[in-house]
Amino acid sequence: MSGQNHEHHVSSAGQLWAVAAGLFILTILTVVMAKFVAIPPPFDVIVALSIALVKAFLVAAFFMNLYWDTKFNAMLLLMAVAFFILMVSITLLDMLYRVDVVPSF
Amino acid sequence: MANHSTTQTAHVQHHFVDGDQQFDTAKLGMWVFLVNEILFFGGLFMAYIVYRAWYPELFTEAALELNTFWGAVNTIVLIGSSLTVAMAIRSAQKNQTKGLKINLLITIGLAIVFMVIKGFEYSHKFHLGIFPGQFYSYEGLQHAQAPIFFSIYYMMTGIHALHVIIGIGLMMWIYVRARRGEFGSDYYTPVEMTGLYWHLVDLIWIFLFPLLYLIE
Amino acid sequence: MATAEASPSGNMKTLQVKRYKPSENPKKTYLTEEKGLWSWLTTVDHKKIGLMYLGSVTFFFLLGGALALLLRTELLTPAKTFIEADTYNQFFTLHGAIMVFFVLVPSIPAALGNFILPMQLGAKDVAFPKLNLTSFYIYVIGAVFTFIALANNGLDTGWTFYTPYSTDSTSSVIWVTLGVFILGFSSILTGTNFIATIHKMRAPGITWGKLPLNLWALYATSIIQILATPVLAITLLLLTMERVLGMGIFDASMGGDPILFQHFFWFYSHPAVYIMIVPGFGIISEVITTFSKKHIFGYWAIALSSLAIAFIGFLVWGHHMFTSGQSGVATTIFSFLTFLVGIPTGIKILNWVATLYKGSIEMKTPMIYVFIFLFLFSIGGFTGIMLGSLAADIHLHDTYYVVAHFHYVMMGGTLIALLAGIHYWWPKMTGKMYNEFQAKIGAALIFIGFNMTFLPQFIMGSQGMPRRYYNYIDQFTIFHQTSTLGSYILGVGFLLIAWYLFRSLMSGEKAPSNPWGSRGLEWQATSPPDLHNFDHTPVVIHGPYDYHKPMEEFQLGLANSHNGHGHAEDIDVEKVSAH
Ligand code: HEM
Ligand SMILES: [Cu+2]
């Protein structure tokens, strides 16, 4: 059974603290960007969400161990996100394009 | 022929071949469950996105009623608790029962702090008359669709808070089992699963915070 | 006993295997080993849990069926026949809600799937047995909520709970939505359990390419369950809150949008129709090969089309909303995407038909149901495509044409497949044979009754008879009366089936371990199986449909249960040389 008694990954305390520190800094950054830097409308959301995505990546990869885990678990997470995006984007095809109820009326 | 797995212990249920299989299975099951959680919250995010697209000015105005400072503090608290839960798993992996217990207690403490802050935020809003839906009676924000924003706000943060409460319960249960000395480097599956759940609660908040509190 | 040895090739692992022929008339079975009501209620055995689901599903089916017969009876005459209009609304709502949420969704996966899935994997149980029992009780709690609603004002919104009516209706919407909400968790947990089981609990040798198609189908179903069901949960929660707090999200007068509810609802409910039908596809694949004594045609095409259906099924929900006021852009795109679903479904049908070609076909009852399935489901599928075309649907939407369409797919498809499965696995589950002759009569009654009930509905639908109506104009009388008559024949057919199955339990012949000569792994256990399914660890070297290979080669197990296999999927037994 070669390779089966796999070692579970054990993160060092330093690693975990570093990740947390990164998350703290990003949290402060996102507040600063939103409250004290004037970013024109579509970009403020983009900046805020990008920071959130980086934070989410840090949590998923290093706190939830996906970085060392089997790829399949990471794929499950991505699948969930993909189907969420699918749901929203298709729904928006209706919600954003409702010109008049029945075109010819 | 295989050297039979060394992780065979009393914790292995009869239908598994060895501890590794049991651990991997539990973890896969947990991830599948987290997929559910994401799509469950996904429905709320969809409502948020749709109405933000329809009423952008409503969201900018209403977000001013939310307290960014306390939102940010809560974010830090929750991230801190994610760190301690990760440390708890690390302690279990290294057979350090004491570290496991301490980290669990800190996590529970932080979770309670989160809930207390949330409670203050809610009661402040109730005081002003900011209730969800048709019970909305706040004079300060007269936007016609204001009730919708706060319905979404209360649903999102409310269901998130419910998850925090469930997480506190789970962590207490893990703590009791840890005190009985059930966990160690050969068996810490429940600790890791609870940790995964807790990180997801954190993940959701990471998105809720900028989306609700940081709209300028 | 013959010993056989797997010889290594490349990096493959050598396993010592020997032949385990299932014993006939076993003394110890899962039915005899632990007895009494308590042992059933607290069991974590997937087989007993499966049977408990089967019992509950049957109960709900009888309830839903009785409601259907009452509805049809009311429609015998154009005006009032014997019940009030309000009662009529309640009956069709409950009929629909019960049949969809309490019967079809759990029927195949939770009942038959629970029983068969671990056996086809050569596993002792599902990955999380306690969770399995939990999901059964969650189902029961959901049912209790629904009964509370029944006793307390009923429900009259239709099974779709559309807003704004569902926020205004005075019937007990909340009880039912909470009931279905709870039920959703049962479905989610079963799906989670199945995915983990299929990934991690396979016996040595069962690679993805040797996975029975039934399991591919259950796998695809589970994926839909875990992706779609949580959205239903949040939808129902939002609806409940809309009623309790007047949240406004679905309320146009507060700036919300009732059509958003339909998006939410159909994001679950269209995929849910595939939760219902895809497991049926799995059963058809198993039965059709067994009774054609032939390798399945297009194994990978059938396996992967299940996954394709699962995926495309998420893109088409708007075809239920063509006339709702949805934007033209969305409508057009949804219509196009709807046509795509037909492709993987068609691939399956064609592969099944090709499997029959040059097979030695044995017309046993399960196989008869397969033919009924092919016939009825194809009609259902084609009419679905017709409804998916935008222009036609503007005319046909909310008419009996739609009613006929979904009965052809749900009853002609899922329910017929369920009957095929029950008849196919009955000997394995109960250890008894049913009366073949009576079973054939039953199948004939079902077929005749079904077509008599639902074919006329296509015609009156296309002529404009709206669905969910209590009265109708004289022009439609003949169609409605034929339909009602047909439904009575259906009813008789189901009673006959219940009767001979019950009789077989009492006085049926003892079933051999493999009455159909199937190559499936579940048939290499005794009938009924042991508490742990197999008393050895099965080793699989051939695919489940290799009918050209001798039976002995399907009866292998590890010679020594301690010669170690950690994770099933890594083990590939190359070749066995018996000596
Ligand atoms: C080839 C695949 C299919 C296509 C293209 C298709 C298409 C459609 C369309 C366009 C409608 C909407 C008609 C209307 O309301 O105007 C519909 C309704 C429906 N279909 Fe299908 N369908 C397919 C397969 C299925 C299957 C497999 C099932 C269930 C097992 C199913 C169950 C239903 C139900 C329950 C409704 C009516 C829902 C309601 O309004 O109450 N369909 N189908
Ligand atoms: Cu559909």
Image (spheres, rainbow, N blue to C red):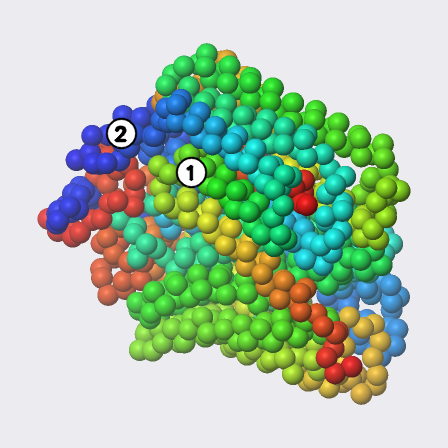
C482 left or right of C130 in image: right
Location of the N terminus of chain C by quadrant is: top left
Circle 2 Cα neighbour tier, 10 Å, few/some/many (<14 / 14–19 / ≥20): some
Q: In screen coordinates, is B1 left or right of C353?
A: left
User: Which disc, if any, is residue B5?
Assistant: 2
Q: Is residue C488 above or below residue B88?
A: below
Residue at screen point 60% across, 19% down: B109
Name which quarter of the figure residue B78 lies in.
top right
**Residue assigned mark 1:** A61
Quadrant where ligand 2 appears: bottom right
Q: Residue placed at 35% from the left, 41% from the top?
A: A70
Q: Distance between the Cα atoms at labels 1 and 2?
A: 28 Å
Q: Is residue C320 shown above or below B17?
A: below
Can you tell which of label 1 and label 2 is closer to the viewer?
A: 1
**Is residue C61 visible to us here?**
no
The spot of residue C207 in percent (x, y) is: 29, 52
The amino acid type, in three-letter code, at marker 2 is: Ser
Q: Chain of mark 2?
A: B
Chain designation of label 1: A
Q: Nearer the viewer, residue C142 or C520?
A: C142
User: SS of the residue at dot 2?
Assistant: loop
Q: Which kind of residue does numbered mark 1 sit on?
A: Ala
